[in-house]
Amino acid sequence: MSDNIPIWRIKYHPKSLDQICGREEIIERLNQIIKLKNFPHLLFVGTEGIGKTTISYLFSKKFLGKSFDANLKLIYANVPLSDEERKQAKSEAYISTSKIGSLAGKRITMPAFIQVKVKPFVQLKVLGGAPFKILIVKNFEALDLNQQGFRRLMEIYGTNCRMILITTKISNIIDPIVSRCQIFLIPRVELKSFNNLILDIAENESLKISNETIEILYKISGGRFSRAIDLLQLSSITGNVIDKNKLYENYQMFQNDLIKSLLMMALKGDFPKTRELARKILSNYKYSTHELFKLLLDELHKLPLSKYTRCKLINYIADSDFRALAARDADIQISALLSKICLFSEYL
Amino acid sequence: MSNVSKIPWVEKYRPKSLKEMALPTARVRSQKVRVDEELKNFVENFFIERNQINKENTKIRNFNRTAIEKEQREEIKISPEKAAVLLEGPPGIGKTSIVYALANDLNMEVIETNASDTRTRATLERKLKETTKTRGIMDFITQSKEKIILIDEIDGIYGVQDRGAIPTVIDLIQNTQFPIIMCSNEYKTNLQPIYNKIRRFEVRPLPKKEVTKIIHNILKKEKITSIKEEDLELLIEKNNGDLRGIINDLQGIGQGNVEEDAKKLILSLHRDSIEEIFSLIRDLFQVSSLREARSLTDKSDVDYNFLYKWINENLPTFIKSNREIAEAYENLSLADEIFGRIRINQYWGLLPYFFDLFAGGVALSRKETPAPKGFRSVTFPRYTSGSYFSLSSAEKELIEKIRKRYEISPIEFIQNFLPFLKILCGTSRKQLKNVSDWLDLDAKEKKFLK
């Protein structure tokens, strides 16, 4: 591993399939596939940040061998299209009048995402010696109804291009897609292998860390390597010895605290300040309205509140989220929720 | 009051020729051009082109008359780019005047249609197509003037009454016998099909120096001496390059009671839309009945699309108690939801609820506390909703640089990785240097990480 990279999560990012630790069973299955030189569409399921993308990316790299650059594409279903891409989709959807056929001069309606990002790639022929191309779609569940567009694509272009779909929630994926894929369930890393990896890093960076501390790290990072390594690096700046106080201190600097303070501020009842904070969070972290409401809900479960309060607040959040589905202005809906919580705080 | 005239000054001093006119600057695809020359060339080229095409078409027609159906040829049409242009710019800077002056110079007639006409497919066709498609026998006998078609205020094509107007305009552009010049105030998405086909001139307001010159000229001709220099300055400033507005104001002062303090008069003339919104918002939070609120919003010509965002922004300034804020937001958020459903499902029947809720519902939620006294400053809506995931250019560049070395999605980057990077770089200068050296960052991006 090169030593010059100042960010540990990148420095210790696995470079090949065999470097991934704690996934012996899955790696073995994938290696078997590579030997056979063939696989159906795959569906990777597992919670956030546990390495689904890394595994699928490195697997594809190994599978495609030398020609992986031209035959592999990784796309994110939850990243909205930019304005240019939207425009492109619009202009491409128009079939020129000079073409022959009943569709000439008409617009075909196809989801812009598939139009711009998926179709051009899957339609192109395989380059180099690879058996087929591989398309990795991350956060597949974010496609919602556009998933329908994938059904036929997977069949028509299946021989040319295999897809690896990655998702955190299999329940949000429509049945026809699930039935077309081989499912890989990727569990959270076990503490034992997590322990080994952290110890490796500690040895490499000459850190002192006890097994109990690693256990705490495992707990607060939720088994996510990238988060854990981030925390480790931050803690290491002030000294070589890592203890749990340092970890908690650094953990509090992360974003979930902002949501918590937003909720706390709303419960204090100062509306103008609360709205200011909410806007700041939104502009810094680019959450959608729904994401913000969900984070608030998550935070609500962690706070020590009475049963009645909790239910009431959940009711408010649910109502606002439901309204926001149809509403035009996100800021109004968020302000409405915050004003309700501010009012509610007066009865506490 | 000697100089009371029947025609408004705006018409009186409308330039008769391009030569005597102060020409605004214009841009085409962000390149500076001279509007007068470009337009003149456009009109002249159009007629040359048209005559050629007409000759060709006569030949084709004659040929078709004798040929069997299989071999018949299609008549050629003039390309849209050569048939029409669009002038786009703020009101009152001389877009319409240019066209009339040009027509005058070239000895042509102007056929105008503007937002005061209902522009449904049928009416537009009736008015324009007759003159554009067929040229009557009388035209050849009397050698009548050539014509320019002016479609003014094309951004005013709107709503149910003007249904089908845009396809008609496009159709017109493709079949016209006369050059078409369109004017519009702002970029409108529903005009996109037109923009794609033709050249768009972005006309800029006149520089202040030119405006002052014109104003002095008019004052001299009207023999008005009672207006002070600094008041003129104020007038020009207030109208923000809108020459028509300035001349209208000037006429108001010149023909009104001149002895009265001129400054007061100028300031009492409301034309500035921002100021109008400001006072509307202030008034709205003072009302005591639903009817008052409705009449306020009905009377103003502020676009309700924006108005309720203004209310959202300024609500906490005028309403203070938590109970009332919550109540106001209950109404406002419901109004917003209704508006959303109207737009999604076209339930326009729901619109009355929207108006009552966002104006009256908000204003009347103040029950216990008295109406706010004294002056309160109104602020612009700062939060713009819409595409929620829009990145700044600094963020975009940073993502590009990192993605060369580490595959990460933009969302994951903003929500998880960037906060970490900021904390890491904030701990010490050494860390910042390490990171920036590795990523090859410039000073601006470094600052962003701090």
Image (cartoon, coloured by chain):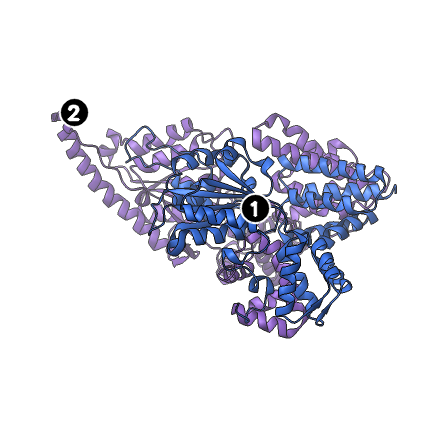
Chain colours: A blue, B purple
Select label 2 or label 1 by which is in front: 1
Quadrant of the snapshot with the C terminus of chain B: bottom right
Give the chain letter at badge 1: B
Residue for point 67% across, 33% down? B355
Q: Amino acid at mark 2?
A: Glu
CA–CA distance in space, label 2 to label 1:
54 Å
Residue receiving disc 1:
B387
Which of the marked residues, 2 or 1, is nearer the chain's N terminus?
2
Residue A301 or residue B263, whichever sits in front:
A301
Residue receiving disc 2:
B69
Residue B193 or residue B443, whichever sits in front:
B443
Residue for point 74% across, 58% down? A252
Q: Secondary structure at mark 1?
A: loop
Image-based side of A238 in relation to A187, left or right? right
Q: Quadrant of residue B356?
A: top right
Q: Amino acid at mark 1?
A: Ser
**Horizontal and vertical percent for residue B247?**
53, 51
**Horizontal and vertical percent for residue A314?**
76, 38
Whether residue B94 is visible: no
Whether residue B272 is visible: yes
**Horizontal and vertical percent for residue B265?**
66, 51
Image-based side of B225 in relation to A238, left or right? left
Q: Callout 2: 10 Å neighbours few (<14), some, many (20+)?
A: few
Task: Work out whether B369 lies above or below B347.
Answer: below
Whether tag 2 and tag 1 are in contact, CB under 8 A, the answer is no
Residue A118 or residue B193, whichever sits in front:
A118
Give the chain letter at badge 2: B
Residue for point 41% across, 34% down? A155
Q: Quadrant of residue B29?
A: bottom left
* 2 and 1 marks on the same chain: yes
The label on residue A26 is none
Residue B244 or residue A147, whichever sits in front:
A147
